[in-house]
Image (cartoon, rainbow, N blue to C red):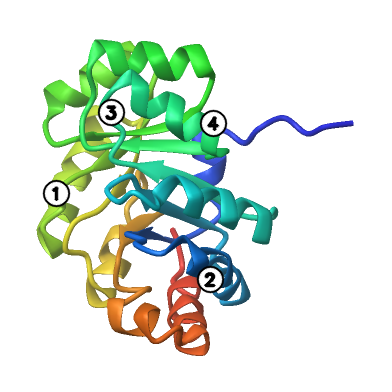
Amino acid sequence: MPTSPRTMRAILARTPVMPILTLHDASTAGDLAQALVKGGIHVFEVVMRTPQAVAAVQAMREATPEADIGMGTLMTPEDVVRAHQAGAQFGVSPGLTHELAQAIQAHRMAFLPGVATASEVMQARAFGLKELKYFPAQGPVGAAWLKDMSQVFPDVLFCPTGGIRPPHIPDYLALPNCCTVGGSWIVPSDLLNDRDWAGITALAQLASRFQTH
């Protein structure tokens, strides 16, 4: 019997750190996905900013069926269609429009839209979206904003991204409304270009050890 797709909240609960990946060569995607999973990271986002992004998601799905792989920078209904056809299990966007929300609802895709203000949180909630990307978090600065929002929107779970480095992560994960942060530092471009899978696995192991509240 097939299992139901995971909700966005359940996906975020699988990892304390979600790698945000920009891939220019889909031929490396399968090995990269396996390196991340070997390091204990089972959720990652591939941004739709390169011609290879769709093929990369497809390769990752094939190489690591146990992982949840999303596509980011979705900004139009057409982007949602491409992500869905690529097999992405969730979508991520820098913001939210009425048209984008409708497309996500039509495809029943788990979704993480970006917000930066309380008004944007309210708009997302009006569409039934309560798992949100806080962007840009600006490194350690965003933790104070999220702490304030936990009192105003206790039903919302945030995934902050933007400038977050390992030293900042414990402050975020200690908050009641944050169980995951996003970051690109787990897959540095030099390690990816060198296909240093052992080095990437080591960084994934470091990321997977962070404790949530």
Image quadrant in which you'd find residue 141? bottom left
| N-terminal-most mark, 3 or 1 | 1
Q: Which residue is mark 2?
A: 36
> Mark 2 and mark 3: span between their CA atoms?
33 Å
Q: Is residue 62 left or right of residue 178?
A: right
Tag nearer the camera, 4 or 3: 4
Q: Residue 56: horizontal and vertical position, in percent? A: 48, 54
Q: Residue at x 22, y 37 (%)?
A: 94
Say which amino acid is labelled 2: Leu
Q: Residue at x 46, y 44 (%)?
A: 70
Image quadrant in which you'd find residue 31? bottom right
Tag nearer the camera, 3 or 1: 1
| N-terminal-most mark, 2 or 3 | 2
Query: Judging from the image, what secondary structure is the residue with disc 3 in?
Result: loop
Say which amino acid is labelled 4: Gln
Whether 70 is drawn above or below 182: the answer is above
Which is more toward the observer, 193 or 97?
193
Q: Residue 150: horizontal and vertical position, in percent? A: 27, 38
Q: Residue 24: horizontal and vertical position, in percent? A: 34, 62
Say which amino acid is labelled 1: Pro
Which is more toward the observer, 42 or 100?
100
Query: Tags 1 and 2 in contact by the CB under 8 Å rule?
Result: no
Q: Which residue is mark 1?
A: 136
Q: Which residue is mark 4?
A: 85
> Mark 3 and mark 1: span between their CA atoms?
19 Å
| N-terminal-most mark, 1 or 2 | 2
| N-terminal-most mark, 2 or 4 | 2
Which is more toward the observer, 27 or 146?
27
The numbered dot on residue 90 is: none
Q: Residue at x 16, y 52 (%)?
A: 137
